[in-house]
Amino acid sequence: MQTDVRGLRLTTSSAAAAQHIDAAVTDFLDYSVGASANLKKALDEDPSFALALCFRAYFMMMLEMRSVLPRIKQTIDELEQRLSSLTRREQLHVAALKAWSEGDIIKACSAWEVIITEHPHDILAMKLHHTLSFYMGQSQVMRSVLAGAIDEWNDATPGYSYVQGMYAYALEECAEYAEAERWGRAAAAGNPGDLWAIHSVAHVLEMQERTKEGLAWLPYTPAQWAQKNPFKAHVWWHGALFAMAEGDTDRVLSIYDNELTSVNTDNYVDVSNQGALLKRLELMGVDVGERWSNLAAFSKKRINDHMLPFRDIHFGLCLAGDGDLEAARQHIGSMRTFAAGKSGWQAESMNRIAVPLCEAIVLAAEGHADKAAELLWPIRHDFARIGGSNAQRDLFAQILCDAAVRGNKHAIARSLLAERVKARPDRKDNWTAYADVLASLGETKLAEGARGRAAKAAHAGA
Ligand SMILES: [Fe+2]
């Protein structure tokens, strides 16, 4: 029996294996490319090291590809045969892995929650719970679990900054921006390489429309982040949003072409970040050229995967963005089939939100913006159920707004834009669209007021 760097028991007799898994966990939390290599070293030292086998399977799950599931099942079968020889914490990791691989993310999170409650220093369970809760849009859960554990940490606990960064993000998603910024900046000061902490502060700056501060916060180049894993593209995506708000669409396209696409590999095409950015540019009236085609080609291969509703929506977005509406319809059909007759978060999120969102995107692309608006309007308060961040989901609010405006659903558009200018009071595009809608409804005075606000707005964008 060995222990990890935070004193948690590990079922292995190899001290070297324990050290390698510590390094792998650190790399995982740090979004460094070395995590897999360190994990391999741990398993080379002790091929039966249960937590390392579990961690390797977690990594495979993070690829979000159905094709890896048989291999993960093999690992689970092997571990289940010797569960009694493992610690309770390791047994719970196996249970979490099994639930996740079977598509029951809530059950997986429950197992990680038990681990965190009993072992608040299990940072692997913490990070996985945080990530998967984020995938489900469960901001309050993220915050609650971290709030319950963070007092057990301090500067002397290895990896404290990662916990601070996670807590910062959870607070930000719960709109507690001042506290989120305080925790996020402390985390980034403690570990300048912690992308999640950097990202948490970027979210605060995004939600508070502090775009110039945002651009200054994210000056990182591909060379500086050469050793970071593909998550760095998402942080660059935030930089692109700040540039977009400043109206600098050339800079946005440059970030797309140079930073975002710099992380592409054969097995990783960044559909969510890239597709979302292209769609936002199009909603601003920018011609994105042929950039959809690569994303659509990749999305076409994933039509039947359905690992996450959030990802499925982006596959649909990219297929429709490229004009391949037949493939987009095929994808929607496959989503329906996948979720039919099933219960649980994944199926419900798919049926209630992801399918209508994809339908609306296709309807709008076919020229039926009015029908798209009608489809999205009743479900708009439930967009959080597809997961992702508030900033990411704002794209779907923008798509609804655009559909209502283009589909001449004036009353809906007025309501949406009235809400939007309050949430984003310094965005010229919002005020201009609001003024146009008010004018269409004959509300001249309010329209004049909105036009006046548009003229004074510090930022472009929506
Ligand atoms: Fe983000």
Image (spheres, rainbow, N blue to C red):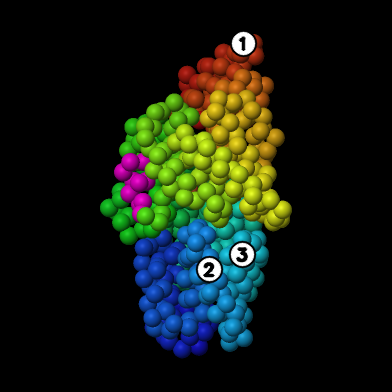
The residue at which mark 2 appears reads as 70
Question: Which comes sooner in the sequence, label 3 or label 2?
Answer: 2
The secondary element bearing badge 2 is classed as helix
Q: CA distance from mark 2 to mark 1?
A: 63 Å
Question: What is the number of the mark on residue 102?
Answer: 3
Percent position of residue 323, x then y: 47, 33
Q: Nearer the viewer, residue 382 or 267?
A: 267
Please state the horizontal and vertical placement of residue 217, each as a whole percent of the image. 39, 46
Q: Secondary structure at mark 1?
A: helix
Q: Nearer the viewer, residue 200 or 180?
A: 200
Q: Is residue 156 above or below residue 350?
A: below
Callout 3: few (<14), some (14-19), or many (20+) C-alpha neighbours within 10 Å? few
Q: Is residue 262 visible?
A: yes
Q: What amino acid type is highlighted by mark number 3?
A: Glu
Q: Which residue sits at x=56%, y=17%?
A: 436
Q: Residue at x 33, y 55 (%)?
A: 225
Q: Nearer the viewer, mark 3 or mark 1?
A: 3
Please say whether residue 260 is one of the residues in the magenta stretch. yes
**Residue assigned mark 1:** 444
Q: Which residues are magenta?
A: 256-265
